[in-house]
Amino acid sequence: MPDFAIVLAVNAGVILALFVLAWAICVAMKDVTPVDSLWGLGMGVVAVSTFIQTGGDTQRGIVMTAIAVAWSLRLGGYMLWRWRDHGPDGRYVRMLDKAKAERGWGYGYAAFRLVFMLQMPLLWLVCLPVQLGQVPNEPATLGALGVAGEVLAIFGILYETLADWQLVQFKKNPENAGKVMDKGLWRYSRHPNYFGDACVWWGLWLIAAETNLGLFSIVGPIYLVYTLTRWSGMPTVEGRMRRRKPDYEDYARRTSAFIPWPPKPE
């Protein structure tokens, strides 16, 4: 079996074990919201698993793993804090209640079938750059494309960190209750945190793309952007915001959805 196939298979097993453990804990708590933090933390685990399997003796492997771990700790930690601060995610509560009422599924089965079983393969898929990009030994050092990817990924981590911090500070102010966040980075994009995520994983792909094998991992960032912009990211958030905040339509009219851009005149 080729080396890359072994790495991918081992990481699939690591993800399965991680999610089964998390599923058991979440079922015991009757709350699957922590799976959102597992999405971030799991990517760091996959990067480290690959680093160990491939020997971790190249500059490319060290840089990719460090970036993936830093990103995963930031996102995973933030999502854990948000869960503890905000409580259970209403989306999951409604989803599992509906499965029980309409299909007669128990909580554990519904949680695994609708939440955990779906996210496991998606995590593996999005992580392809830090898996395939670390397998080849050559080139061991970063070239111009790899350095550009490193800069883009670091920028993405800083950008989404600032966006999340600005949003948290905005929500802390009681005077902003019911208002739309349109300050700071949120003035130039309705989803600057998602844009930062995309920068991180496209940056990691650029590093991976310096190897022939890593080029094929492009499906990872493509799928991530699709998820953020067309599936469970922006559509879910925007639907909720439009229902809850009357001013959101005007904000959406003048503000770029994803890529930061100067707002249109009011």
Image (cartoon, rainbow, N blue to C red):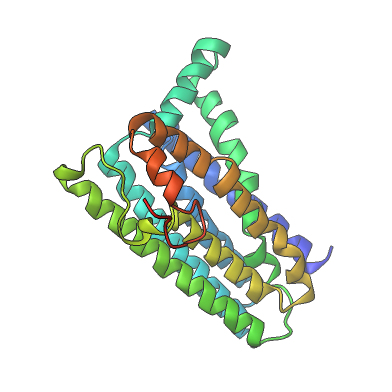
Nearer to me, 242 or 41: 242
Choose top left, top right, bottom left or bottom right for residue 199.
bottom right
Residue 45, horizontal then vertical, whole percent: 53, 60
Choose top left, top right, bottom left or bottom right for residue 10.
bottom right
Residue 42, horizontal then vertical, whole percent: 52, 54
Residue lying at the far right in this picture: please name it: 1
Q: Can residue 108 be seen by looking at this rendering?
A: yes
Residue 156, horizontal then vertical, whole percent: 47, 67
Using residue 1 as the reference point, say whether residue 201 is left or right of it. Answer: left
Residue at the (75%, 69%) spot, across then down:
215
236 lies above or below 204: above
Choose top left, top right, bottom left or bottom right for residue 244.
top left
137 lies above or below 198: below
Residue at the (37%, 63%) spot, across then down:
161
Residue lying at the far front in this picture: please name it: 265
Residue at the (41%, 34%) spot, across then down:
242
Residue 55, horizontal then vertical, whole percent: 64, 77
235 lies above or below 223: above
